[in-house]
Image (cartoon, rainbow, N blue to C red):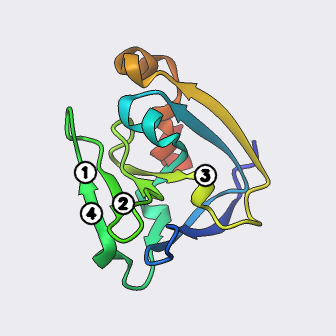
Amino acid sequence: MNLETVVHNGGCHCKQVRWRVQAPSSVVAWKCNCSDCAMRGNVHFVVPASRFELLGESEKFLITYTFGTHTAKHIFCNVCGITSFYVPRSNPDGIAVTVKCVDPGTLSHVEIRQFDGVNWETSYNQTSIASCSKLETEAK
């Protein structure tokens, strides 16, 4: 996969939350079946937190929900309710970007992999998801 990054812009439905993220144009995204992701139909790709930037006054429109281990920070817009990004349990040092919240035109390919959030520990140990929030120099 080409690891050269491009700038993707995106945000929530009402546009009160806007962000930019540096990631490849071709990404590996994760479809999770945990209780939260399954209900939202979430498919996301993970990036290092340093590659994600909130824009403008977005922060004042955000609310965070946690449950279970309280490691994941499910962040959503307090106006429209959309979770366009969040901090995943699998990558607390990264940001999970909801694929469908990326503005059109910069994602050239999305490979969707399954993450068995119902059996979280097993899936975490059997996938490469933990490496997704590491910079290339850290992942080696």
Image location of residue 46, percent across then percent down: 51, 47
Asked whether disc 4 touches disc 2, contact meaning CB atoms under 8 Å apart, the reply is yes
Q: Nearer the viewer, residue 24 or 84?
A: 84
The residue type indicated by label 3 comes to Val
In the image, residue 115 above or below residue 80: above
Residue depicted at x 20% and y 32%: 68
Mark toward the start of the polypeptide (4 vs 2):
4
Q: Which residue is mark 1?
A: 65
Q: Is residue 29 left or right of residue 127?
A: right
Mark toward the start of the polypeptide (1 vs 2):
1
In the image, residue 125 above or below residue 45: above
How far apart marks 1 and 3 lie (CA) works out to 20 Å
Asked whether disc 4 touches disc 1, contact meaning CB atoms under 8 Å apart, the reply is yes
In the image, residue 58 above or below residue 130: below
The circle drawn on residue 63 is 4
* Residue farthest to the bottom, as pictured: 56
The residue type indicated by label 4 comes to Ile
How far apart marks 3 and 4 lie (CA) works out to 20 Å
Q: Residues within 10 Å of mark 2 (few under 14, many from 20)?
A: many
Image location of residue 28, percent across then percent down: 64, 40
The circle drawn on residue 128 is none
In the image, residue 132 above or below residue 19: above
Q: Which residue is mark 3?
A: 99
Mark toward the start of the polypeptide (1 vs 3):
1
Q: Which residue is mark 2?
A: 76
Q: Residues within 10 Å of mark 4 (few under 14, many from 20)?
A: some
How far apart marks 1 and 2 lie (CA) works out to 8 Å
